[in-house]
Amino acid sequence: MNAAHDDALMLYGEAFASRFLLGTALYSSPTVMQASIQAAGCEMVTLGLRRQNPASGDGDAFWQILRDSGCRLLPNTAGCRSAREAITLAQMSRELFDTPWIKLEVIGDDYNLQPDPFGLLEATRELIGQGFKVLPYCTDDLILCQRLRDAGCEALMPWGSPIGTGLGLMNRYALTTLRQRLDVPLIIDAGLGAPSQAAEAMEMGFDGVLLNTAVARAHRPALMAEAFAEAIRAGRKAHLAGLMQQRQTASPSTPTVGQPFWHREGG
Amino acid sequence: MNEITLRLNDEPARLPAGTSLADALQAWHYADRRVAVAVNGEFVPRSGYAEQILQDDDRIDIVAPVGGG
Protein backbone atom coordinates (compact mmCIF):
# COMPACT_ATOMS: atom_id res chain seq x y z
CA MET A 1 0.00 0.00 0.00
CA ASN A 2 1.39 3.40 -0.90
CA ALA A 3 0.26 6.90 -0.08
CA ALA A 4 -1.37 7.32 -3.48
CA HIS A 5 -3.45 4.17 -3.16
CA ASP A 6 -6.50 5.73 -1.52
CA ASP A 7 -5.94 9.11 -3.09
CA ALA A 8 -9.35 9.65 -4.67
CA LEU A 9 -10.36 12.79 -6.55
CA MET A 10 -13.45 14.15 -4.80
CA LEU A 11 -15.90 16.09 -6.98
CA TYR A 12 -19.23 17.16 -5.50
CA GLY A 13 -18.94 14.45 -2.86
CA GLU A 14 -18.19 11.67 -5.33
CA ALA A 15 -14.87 9.81 -5.39
CA PHE A 16 -12.94 9.15 -8.59
CA ALA A 17 -9.89 6.89 -8.61
CA SER A 18 -8.72 8.38 -11.91
CA ARG A 19 -7.63 12.00 -12.20
CA PHE A 20 -7.75 11.89 -15.99
CA LEU A 21 -10.87 13.20 -17.74
CA LEU A 22 -11.01 12.58 -21.47
CA GLY A 23 -12.91 14.25 -24.30
CA THR A 24 -14.71 12.20 -26.94
CA ALA A 25 -14.30 14.43 -30.03
CA LEU A 26 -11.96 14.31 -33.01
CA TYR A 27 -11.21 10.56 -33.03
CA SER A 28 -10.86 8.88 -36.41
CA SER A 29 -13.55 6.33 -35.46
CA PRO A 30 -15.71 5.25 -32.49
CA THR A 31 -13.45 2.21 -32.12
CA VAL A 32 -10.36 4.38 -31.71
CA MET A 33 -12.22 6.46 -29.14
CA GLN A 34 -13.20 3.32 -27.24
CA ALA A 35 -9.61 2.05 -27.15
CA SER A 36 -8.42 5.46 -25.96
CA ILE A 37 -10.96 5.59 -23.14
CA GLN A 38 -9.88 2.15 -22.00
CA ALA A 39 -6.18 2.99 -22.21
CA ALA A 40 -6.73 6.23 -20.30
CA GLY A 41 -8.47 4.38 -17.49
CA CYS A 42 -10.66 7.44 -17.04
CA GLU A 43 -13.93 7.42 -15.14
CA MET A 44 -15.43 10.56 -16.61
CA VAL A 45 -15.72 11.58 -20.27
CA THR A 46 -16.98 14.79 -21.81
CA LEU A 47 -19.40 14.95 -24.71
CA GLY A 48 -21.56 17.50 -26.45
CA LEU A 49 -24.92 18.16 -28.07
CA ARG A 50 -25.46 19.32 -31.62
CA ARG A 51 -28.36 19.76 -33.99
CA GLN A 52 -29.26 16.47 -35.56
CA ASN A 53 -30.97 15.51 -38.76
CA PRO A 54 -33.36 12.61 -38.08
CA ALA A 55 -32.07 10.71 -41.11
CA SER A 56 -28.62 10.56 -39.58
CA GLY A 57 -27.89 7.54 -37.41
CA ASP A 58 -24.27 8.54 -36.88
CA GLY A 59 -24.53 8.91 -33.17
CA ASP A 60 -25.75 5.41 -32.37
CA ALA A 61 -22.36 3.63 -32.25
CA PHE A 62 -20.88 6.57 -30.38
CA TRP A 63 -23.61 6.48 -27.80
CA GLN A 64 -23.43 2.70 -27.33
CA ILE A 65 -19.68 2.84 -26.70
CA LEU A 66 -20.02 5.57 -24.11
CA ARG A 67 -22.78 3.71 -22.32
CA ASP A 68 -20.73 0.51 -22.29
CA SER A 69 -17.64 2.33 -21.02
CA GLY A 70 -19.22 2.77 -17.60
CA CYS A 71 -17.76 6.28 -17.44
CA ARG A 72 -19.70 9.10 -15.84
CA LEU A 73 -20.83 11.48 -18.57
CA LEU A 74 -19.89 15.13 -18.35
CA PRO A 75 -21.85 16.98 -21.04
CA ASN A 76 -20.48 20.33 -22.12
CA THR A 77 -21.97 23.56 -23.38
CA ALA A 78 -19.24 24.04 -25.98
CA GLY A 79 -19.80 26.82 -28.46
CA CYS A 80 -22.34 28.72 -26.37
CA ARG A 81 -21.83 32.48 -26.62
CA SER A 82 -24.08 33.70 -23.84
CA ALA A 83 -25.26 32.65 -20.41
CA ARG A 84 -28.74 32.14 -21.82
CA GLU A 85 -27.54 29.70 -24.52
CA ALA A 86 -25.41 27.79 -22.02
CA ILE A 87 -28.25 27.52 -19.52
CA THR A 88 -30.64 26.18 -22.16
CA LEU A 89 -28.09 23.65 -23.43
CA ALA A 90 -27.34 22.54 -19.87
CA GLN A 91 -31.03 21.94 -19.29
CA MET A 92 -31.25 19.91 -22.52
CA SER A 93 -28.19 17.90 -21.43
CA ARG A 94 -29.63 17.18 -18.03
CA GLU A 95 -32.71 15.64 -19.57
CA LEU A 96 -30.96 13.76 -22.35
CA PHE A 97 -28.15 12.29 -20.24
CA ASP A 98 -30.09 12.12 -17.00
CA THR A 99 -27.30 13.88 -15.12
CA PRO A 100 -26.95 17.15 -13.21
CA TRP A 101 -23.23 17.32 -14.09
CA ILE A 102 -22.26 19.97 -16.62
CA LYS A 103 -18.97 21.24 -18.00
CA LEU A 104 -20.03 24.85 -18.36
CA GLU A 105 -18.51 26.77 -21.26
CA VAL A 106 -19.42 30.30 -22.26
CA ILE A 107 -17.07 31.39 -25.00
CA GLY A 108 -16.18 35.06 -25.24
CA ASP A 109 -13.87 35.27 -28.23
CA ASP A 110 -13.59 33.38 -31.51
CA TYR A 111 -9.83 33.76 -31.85
CA ASN A 112 -8.70 32.01 -28.68
CA LEU A 113 -12.02 30.55 -27.49
CA GLN A 114 -11.42 32.33 -24.21
CA PRO A 115 -14.16 31.86 -21.62
CA ASP A 116 -16.36 34.91 -21.08
CA PRO A 117 -15.95 35.39 -17.31
CA PHE A 118 -19.08 37.51 -16.94
CA GLY A 119 -21.39 35.17 -18.83
CA LEU A 120 -19.80 32.19 -17.13
CA LEU A 121 -20.45 33.53 -13.65
CA GLU A 122 -24.02 34.47 -14.56
CA ALA A 123 -24.75 31.01 -15.98
CA THR A 124 -23.03 29.32 -13.04
CA ARG A 125 -25.20 31.11 -10.49
CA GLU A 126 -28.36 30.22 -12.36
CA LEU A 127 -27.46 26.55 -12.88
CA ILE A 128 -26.23 25.98 -9.32
CA GLY A 129 -29.57 27.39 -8.22
CA GLN A 130 -31.28 24.82 -10.45
CA GLY A 131 -29.37 21.98 -8.81
CA PHE A 132 -26.65 21.44 -11.39
CA LYS A 133 -23.17 20.23 -10.47
CA VAL A 134 -21.25 22.83 -12.40
CA LEU A 135 -17.66 22.31 -13.52
CA PRO A 136 -16.88 25.68 -15.12
CA TYR A 137 -14.29 25.94 -17.88
CA CYS A 138 -12.64 29.19 -16.81
CA THR A 139 -9.54 31.29 -17.28
CA ASP A 140 -6.78 31.41 -14.69
CA ASP A 141 -8.06 34.72 -13.28
CA LEU A 142 -7.99 34.47 -9.49
CA ILE A 143 -10.94 36.74 -8.82
CA LEU A 144 -13.15 34.96 -11.34
CA CYS A 145 -12.25 31.63 -9.76
CA GLN A 146 -13.04 32.96 -6.29
CA ARG A 147 -16.41 34.23 -7.49
CA LEU A 148 -17.19 30.88 -9.10
CA ARG A 149 -16.32 29.10 -5.87
CA ASP A 150 -18.44 31.56 -3.90
CA ALA A 151 -21.32 30.87 -6.31
CA GLY A 152 -21.23 27.25 -5.18
CA CYS A 153 -18.84 25.48 -7.56
CA GLU A 154 -17.17 22.60 -5.73
CA ALA A 155 -14.52 22.28 -8.44
CA LEU A 156 -13.09 24.59 -11.10
CA MET A 157 -11.49 23.89 -14.47
CA PRO A 158 -9.03 26.64 -15.43
CA TRP A 159 -7.39 26.52 -18.84
CA GLY A 160 -3.74 25.66 -19.30
CA SER A 161 -3.81 27.44 -22.67
CA PRO A 162 -6.43 27.89 -25.41
CA ILE A 163 -8.38 24.83 -26.56
CA GLY A 164 -6.59 22.66 -29.08
CA THR A 165 -3.29 24.56 -29.00
CA GLY A 166 -1.11 22.06 -27.14
CA LEU A 167 0.84 24.97 -25.66
CA GLY A 168 0.73 23.60 -22.12
CA LEU A 169 0.71 25.77 -19.01
CA MET A 170 0.94 29.29 -20.41
CA ASN A 171 0.78 31.25 -17.17
CA ARG A 172 2.46 29.40 -14.34
CA TYR A 173 2.32 32.37 -12.01
CA ALA A 174 -1.46 32.64 -12.30
CA LEU A 175 -1.95 28.89 -12.01
CA THR A 176 0.31 28.65 -8.96
CA THR A 177 -1.60 31.52 -7.38
CA LEU A 178 -4.90 29.72 -8.00
CA ARG A 179 -3.54 26.63 -6.32
CA GLN A 180 -2.31 28.59 -3.32
CA ARG A 181 -5.51 30.61 -2.88
CA LEU A 182 -8.23 28.04 -3.56
CA ASP A 183 -9.07 24.90 -1.61
CA VAL A 184 -11.57 23.42 -4.09
CA PRO A 185 -10.41 20.78 -6.58
CA LEU A 186 -8.81 22.37 -9.65
CA ILE A 187 -8.69 20.51 -12.95
CA ILE A 188 -6.54 21.81 -15.77
CA ASP A 189 -8.82 21.84 -18.79
CA ALA A 190 -7.59 22.55 -22.31
CA GLY A 191 -4.33 23.38 -23.97
CA LEU A 192 -2.25 20.41 -22.91
CA GLY A 193 -0.30 18.81 -25.74
CA ALA A 194 2.21 16.51 -24.06
CA PRO A 195 2.21 14.15 -21.08
CA SER A 196 5.08 16.13 -19.55
CA GLN A 197 2.77 19.16 -19.37
CA ALA A 198 0.13 17.10 -17.59
CA ALA A 199 2.72 15.80 -15.15
CA GLU A 200 3.83 19.36 -14.44
CA ALA A 201 0.27 20.43 -13.70
CA MET A 202 -0.13 17.57 -11.27
CA GLU A 203 3.24 18.31 -9.63
CA MET A 204 2.01 21.88 -9.07
CA GLY A 205 -0.85 20.47 -7.06
CA PHE A 206 -3.68 20.47 -9.55
CA ASP A 207 -6.19 17.74 -8.85
CA GLY A 208 -6.81 16.44 -12.33
CA VAL A 209 -6.46 16.98 -16.05
CA LEU A 210 -9.05 17.14 -18.83
CA LEU A 211 -7.89 16.88 -22.40
CA ASN A 212 -9.01 15.70 -25.80
CA THR A 213 -7.05 16.87 -28.83
CA ALA A 214 -3.62 15.67 -27.66
CA VAL A 215 -4.94 12.11 -27.49
CA ALA A 216 -7.41 12.12 -30.37
CA ARG A 217 -4.94 13.67 -32.83
CA ALA A 218 -1.95 11.49 -31.90
CA HIS A 219 -0.80 8.97 -34.51
CA ARG A 220 -1.66 6.27 -31.97
CA PRO A 221 -4.38 7.71 -29.72
CA ALA A 222 -4.67 4.77 -27.32
CA LEU A 223 -0.93 4.77 -26.72
CA MET A 224 -1.00 8.51 -26.08
CA ALA A 225 -3.90 8.05 -23.66
CA GLU A 226 -1.80 5.55 -21.75
CA ALA A 227 1.15 7.95 -21.75
CA PHE A 228 -0.99 10.74 -20.31
CA ALA A 229 -2.46 8.40 -17.69
CA GLU A 230 1.03 7.44 -16.51
CA ALA A 231 2.21 11.05 -16.51
CA ILE A 232 -0.80 12.15 -14.48
CA ARG A 233 -0.22 9.40 -11.93
CA ALA A 234 3.50 10.24 -11.76
CA GLY A 235 2.83 13.94 -11.30
CA ARG A 236 0.29 13.27 -8.58
CA LYS A 237 2.67 11.01 -6.69
CA ALA A 238 5.41 13.63 -6.98
CA HIS A 239 3.08 16.25 -5.55
CA LEU A 240 2.16 14.00 -2.63
CA ALA A 241 5.81 13.13 -2.08
CA GLY A 242 6.84 16.79 -2.02
CA LEU A 243 9.23 18.29 -4.55
CA MET A 244 12.63 19.47 -3.37
CA GLN A 245 13.35 23.18 -3.22
CA GLN A 246 15.22 24.50 -6.23
CA ARG A 247 18.51 26.30 -5.61
CA GLN A 248 21.08 28.13 -7.73
CA THR A 249 24.29 26.57 -6.41
CA ALA A 250 25.40 22.98 -6.74
CA SER A 251 25.33 20.74 -3.72
CA PRO A 252 27.02 17.31 -3.90
CA SER A 253 24.81 14.35 -3.22
CA THR A 254 27.69 11.93 -2.58
CA PRO A 255 29.37 12.53 0.82
CA THR A 256 32.43 14.75 0.67
CA VAL A 257 33.89 13.28 3.85
CA GLY A 258 36.38 10.55 3.03
CA GLN A 259 36.94 11.69 -0.53
CA PRO A 260 39.92 9.64 -1.86
CA PHE A 261 42.97 11.32 -3.40
CA TRP A 262 42.07 14.51 -1.59
CA HIS A 263 44.74 16.08 0.58
CA ARG A 264 44.94 19.29 2.50
CA GLU A 265 47.05 21.86 0.65
CA GLY A 266 50.21 22.71 2.62
CA GLY A 267 49.29 20.22 5.37
CA MET B 1 -55.83 24.13 -44.13
CA ASN B 2 -53.85 26.89 -42.46
CA GLU B 3 -50.11 26.34 -42.34
CA ILE B 4 -47.39 27.85 -40.21
CA THR B 5 -43.80 28.37 -41.27
CA LEU B 6 -41.05 27.84 -38.77
CA ARG B 7 -37.35 27.04 -38.50
CA LEU B 8 -36.24 23.51 -37.69
CA ASN B 9 -32.54 23.50 -36.84
CA ASP B 10 -32.26 26.71 -38.85
CA GLU B 11 -33.91 25.19 -41.93
CA PRO B 12 -37.38 26.26 -43.12
CA ALA B 13 -40.23 23.88 -42.24
CA ARG B 14 -44.02 23.95 -42.57
CA LEU B 15 -46.70 22.41 -40.39
CA PRO B 16 -50.48 22.59 -40.11
CA ALA B 17 -51.56 25.33 -37.73
CA GLY B 18 -52.25 24.03 -34.23
CA THR B 19 -49.67 21.23 -34.38
CA SER B 20 -48.22 20.25 -31.01
CA LEU B 21 -44.49 19.77 -30.52
CA ALA B 22 -45.18 16.08 -29.87
CA ASP B 23 -46.92 15.69 -33.23
CA ALA B 24 -44.22 17.71 -34.99
CA LEU B 25 -41.49 15.43 -33.63
CA GLN B 26 -43.48 12.45 -34.87
CA ALA B 27 -43.89 13.99 -38.31
CA TRP B 28 -40.19 14.83 -38.50
CA HIS B 29 -39.19 11.26 -37.51
CA TYR B 30 -37.64 12.24 -34.19
CA ALA B 31 -40.16 10.44 -32.02
CA ASP B 32 -37.94 7.50 -31.07
CA ARG B 33 -34.66 9.35 -31.19
CA ARG B 34 -32.42 10.32 -28.30
CA VAL B 35 -32.89 14.07 -28.59
CA ALA B 36 -33.64 17.16 -26.53
CA VAL B 37 -35.66 20.14 -27.74
CA ALA B 38 -35.68 23.90 -27.36
CA VAL B 39 -38.25 26.29 -28.82
CA ASN B 40 -37.17 29.88 -29.36
CA GLY B 41 -34.07 29.23 -27.25
CA GLU B 42 -36.02 27.88 -24.27
CA PHE B 43 -35.70 24.26 -23.17
CA VAL B 44 -38.90 22.23 -23.47
CA PRO B 45 -38.93 19.09 -21.28
CA ARG B 46 -40.41 15.89 -22.69
CA SER B 47 -43.35 16.26 -20.36
CA GLY B 48 -44.24 19.49 -22.17
CA TYR B 49 -44.19 18.23 -25.77
CA ALA B 50 -47.90 17.43 -25.95
CA GLU B 51 -49.15 20.75 -24.66
CA GLN B 52 -46.68 22.95 -26.57
CA ILE B 53 -48.55 24.20 -29.64
CA LEU B 54 -46.12 25.49 -32.26
CA GLN B 55 -46.57 29.00 -33.61
CA ASP B 56 -45.65 30.75 -36.82
CA ASP B 57 -41.95 31.76 -36.87
CA ASP B 58 -41.02 29.48 -33.95
CA ARG B 59 -37.38 28.42 -33.94
CA ILE B 60 -36.98 24.77 -32.98
CA ASP B 61 -33.64 23.27 -32.03
CA ILE B 62 -33.36 19.49 -31.80
CA VAL B 63 -30.05 18.18 -30.52
CA ALA B 64 -28.44 14.77 -30.07
CA PRO B 65 -25.21 13.52 -28.46
CA VAL B 66 -21.92 14.08 -30.27
CA GLY B 67 -18.28 13.76 -29.31
CA GLY B 68 -17.11 16.73 -27.27
CA GLY B 69 -14.12 17.97 -25.34
Image (cartoon, coloured by chain):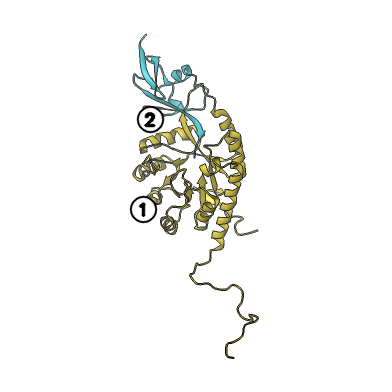
Looking at the image, which residue is at 50% across and 72% down? A249
Q: Which residue is mark 2?
A: B42
Is any atom of residue B8 visible in this view? yes
Letter of the yellow chain: A
Q: Position of residue B15 (x, y in %)?
A: 40, 15
Q: Position of residue A105 (x, y in %)?
A: 42, 41
Displayed quadrant of residue A241? bottom right
Using the rendered image, report if marks 1 and 2 lie on a common chain: no
Q: Looking at the rendering, in which quadrant would you find the N terminus of chain A?
A: bottom right
Q: Residues within 10 Å of mark 2 (few under 14, many from 20)?
A: some
Q: Position of residue A177 (x, y in %)?
A: 41, 58
Eyeballing the image, is A113 above or below B8? below
Image colour assigned to chain B: cyan
Q: Looking at the rendering, in which quadrant would you find the C terminus of chain A?
A: bottom right
Q: Which three-letter amino acid code belongs to the residue tagged 1?
A: Ile
Q: How many marks?
A: 2
User: Which mark is nearer the camera, 1 or 2?
Assistant: 1
Looking at the image, which residue is at 44% across and 18% down? B24
Residue that extends furthest to the bottom in the rendered view of this protein: A267
Taking depth in this image into account, of B52 and A77 the one nearest to the observer is A77
Residue that extends furthest to the top in the rendered view of this protein: B1
Image mark for residue A235: none
Q: Which three-letter amino acid code belongs to the residue tagged 2?
A: Glu
Q: Circle 2 — which element?
A: strand
Q: Which residue is mark 1?
A: A143
Task: For mark 2, name the chain.
Answer: B
Left or right of A208 on screen, residue A114: left
Taking depth in this image into account, of A134 and A24 the one nearest to the observer is A24
